[in-house]
Amino acid sequence: MSVVIKVDNLSKKFKDFTAVNNLSFTVNKGDVYGFLGQNGAGKSTTIRMLLTLIKPTTGNITIFEKNLQTNRKKILQQTGAVIEKPDLYKYLSAYDNLSIFAKMSGIKSTKLLLMNQLEMVGLAQRAKDKVETFSQGMKQRLGIAVALVHNPDLIILDEPTNGLDPQGITDIRNLILSLSKDRGKTVVVSSHLLSEIELVANRMIIIHNGRKIVEGNVAELLDPSKALIQLQTTDDIFAQQQLQQTKWIQFLQPNTTKLQLVMPKNEVPQLITDLVSKHVQLLSISPMHALENYFLSLTNNPTTHVESAAN
Amino acid sequence: MWNLLQIELFKISKRPRTYIAFIAIAAIVFIFQFAFKADGQSYMDLMLQSVKDDFTFERVKAINGYFMCYIILNTLLIQVPILVALVAADSISGEANMGTLRLMLSKPISRSQIIIVKFIAATIFTLLLLVWMAITALFLSMFIFGVDDMLIFRVKGDESQILQITKDDVMWRYFAAFGYATVALTVIAALALLLSIFAQNSIGPIISTVCIVIVCTIISNINVPIIDNNVKPFLFTSYLVGWKGFFYIATTEDGEPIKGSLENWPAIRNSLFILIGHIVGLVTLSILIFKRKDILS
């Protein structure tokens, strides 16, 4: 399976504040990749770095196997995005907005193409109306039409269901699924709601305070029979070396700053026994939560709220 | 690039604030024309008071279309920078305020292209303002007041001067003056564009641009040798009214105006170079800053 996005050790600092800290992840072709984190976790900053709106402090981004910094134009020709609110030119009509952004995307748009695009998001009847008369949901749908007008291979949607009514949320969800299943697009979708990601994504990452908590297959990560284990030892490097020689290595989360494993709950006692037998000095094993509970604990704990400079 | 420019001009044309400048200019010009049509003689009497003994001119003919345009330009070209700033200062900050800047920059367009296109669009807007001014202040005044020789009142050093330009020697001077004014006002547009990069809404850059123009204009008008020699040559405002140079006609030793001549062409040319230097500097600085800017709006 080819890799569409590869992010290595990405960091972004705003003066003394670190919004994204040594983040690494990969998105494969055809994935609906969920980007999950509470408000201020660093989702928007990361997405803005993927779109070259913000320059990384350190790290490397490769998209379509090309370096983003040196191939910006080519990569963005194949990328469509809705970044936070779908803000458009309010004094222009839906049709004019779509036409402008189609030209900016470098395609020759015909009236038929633009009307089809508006039809797809249910706005064909309102094509001539100014955007200032649109509801939030209509603006969101028009924003998605703008993101898709040049038929990109990669679609990045930052909190696409924000401010939508239940029907609007369902419509966006169905659209994301259809883009992936019917049109083979790769979609990155961010949200602060696990339930949203769970319904659309096949793979996901959770970030908190700019750091990766966990990355993997959604079905596996949300499996109630599994737990996220965080190990604290006297020597994490030694502990990792010992894990490499055991079956537990398959559960170890890559590119995290701490030793974390997503594994069947009932095998945790065996893990502890094995580590002790290999002379790993354990200080703690925590938290013994399922992923969902763990994410909720982050969301509900007021001390974990950190405002991102980008939000 | 051409596509982007078309988009930019389309957006400017669709914004109501664009037309405020045209309406303001028309209103001021019409007020001037009405006032001079009704009571221009009093103004002329006042102006000729100090020189009436040694100057003879048929006063009715003195208030003509050419003279009217000169009077209007003298007043308007001080205020027009504010109107230019209304549009130019909105270039980047307006996009940031609407949230469209991040969408625009996520498209395959370079940031340099965006600044260049925004600058060209602001320059075209400035040019259109001056064409509109030429239509209303010059051609409409010619229609209303007729055409005759043109009188220029000038204070040079301690003495007042009246220059007389024959009617067949005026029109090229106006074309040159409007061309110069376009360059001068483009400096304001470039300054406003630079300031708009730093802001999230257009109010700040508009006010900042106007404040800079006012402060620099005041400094340009302070007649103290240390400022004359060390500060004024570097201020763009010292050259904003250089268009008047096209109406300062050279004279013979007997004081007779020489048709088709300029009193000090090298000074006008140097002023133009300095203004163009300001434009190049401000736009380059805008590109450099904008290319490094993190888009957080």
Image (spheres, rainbow, N blue to C red):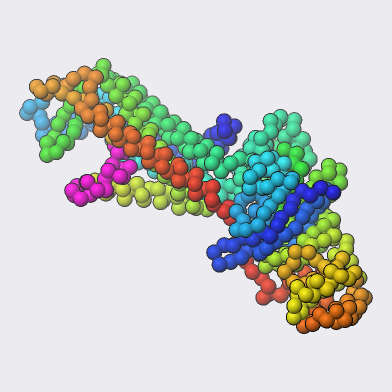
Region rendered in magenta = B222-241
In the rendered image, the residue lying farthest to the right is A266
> Whole-percent x and y of residue B199?
50, 53
> Whole-percent x and y of residue A176?
80, 49
The answer to which quarter of the image holds residue A44 is bottom right
**Residue shown at the point (83%, 73%) measured from the top left:** A242
Give the position of the C terminus of chain A as an image quadrant: bottom right
Residue B85 appears in the picture as rendered:
no
**Residue shown at the point (41%, 42%) measured from the top left:** B281
Up-down: is A261 above or below B239? Answer: below
Reply yes or no: does residue B133 show up in magenta. no
Q: Is residue A181 left or right of residue B242?
A: right
Which of B153 and A240 lies nearest the eye of the viewer? A240
The answer to which quarter of the image holds residue A190 is bottom right
> Whole-percent x and y of residue B172?
31, 21
In the rendered image, the residue lying farthest to the top is B168
**Residue shown at the point (74%, 53%) measured from the top left:** A6
Which of B257 and A9 lies nearest the eye of the viewer? A9
> Whole-percent x and y of residue A128?
67, 36
**Residue shown at the point (78%, 57%) measured from the top left:** A34
Name the dominant secondary structure of the magenta segment.
helix
Q: Is residue A247 left or right of residue B297?
A: right
Total tally of numbered discs in the picture? 0
Which of A281 and A163 lies nearest the eye of the viewer? A281
Residue A52 appears in the picture as rendered:
yes
Which of A166 and B161 lies nearest the eye of the viewer? B161
